[in-house]
Amino acid sequence: MSLNMWQIRNDTLHADKLMADYNTQRRSLHIQTEHEFEQADSSKYLHRPYLERLTDPNHLLQAWCVTMERLHKLNEHRREITLGRDMEVVDEHAEDLDKFDQEGYDR
């Protein structure tokens, strides 16, 4: 058989497997997409409705989910930095507050 005939044969035989793989990935992406829409801090980044987003092909859904995950990590990192900075300010003034408490000033 020629190479072209083998390619046609293989495409025909494996089309069901490819479609099953695509549908499995699609279900997984639907779950991820739904999760991202349920996140509270992502609401300001959702410019398209959920059902409209689900009409995108798999590669676009995948890219969007990865972007949203990175955004969540970035926001979490920012919160940690802000909290850490606030804690440093509290630590700087803790000694003054201890003196204040020990001296018995009226509040």
Image (cartoon, rainbow, N blue to C red):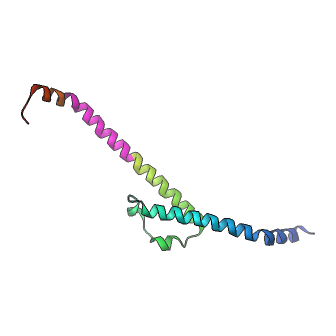
Direction right: furthest residue: 1
| 53 w.r.t. 85: above or below | below
- Quarter of the figure with residue 98: top left
Measured as percent of width and height from the top left, residue 11 is found at 79, 70
Image quadrant where one finds the N terminus = bottom right
Q: Nearer the viewer, residue 60 or 39?
A: 39
Question: For residue 101, what is the image quadrant?
Answer: top left
Q: Residue at x 44, y 64 (%)?
A: 37
Q: Main secondary structure of the magenta part?
A: helix
Residue at image coords 29%, 35%: 88
Left or right of 21, for residue 55 = left
Give me the residue at 33% from left, 42% from top. Answer: 83
Count the numbered circles shown.
0
Which residue is found at the position 54% from the left and 73% from the top? 55
Corner quadrant of residue 9: bottom right
Compared to residue 105, the image places residue 19 above or below, namely: below
* Image location of residue 51, percent across then percent down: 49, 73
Q: Is 77 on the left-hand or right-hand side of 107?
A: right
Residue 43 percent coordinates (x, y): 39, 63
Q: Position of residue 10 (x, y in %)?
A: 82, 68
Q: Is residue 79 magenta?
A: yes
Compared across the picture, whether 55 is left or right of 16 comes to left
Position of the C terminus, as image quadrant, is top left
Q: Which residues are magenta?
A: 78-96
Residue 93 is inside the magenta segment: yes
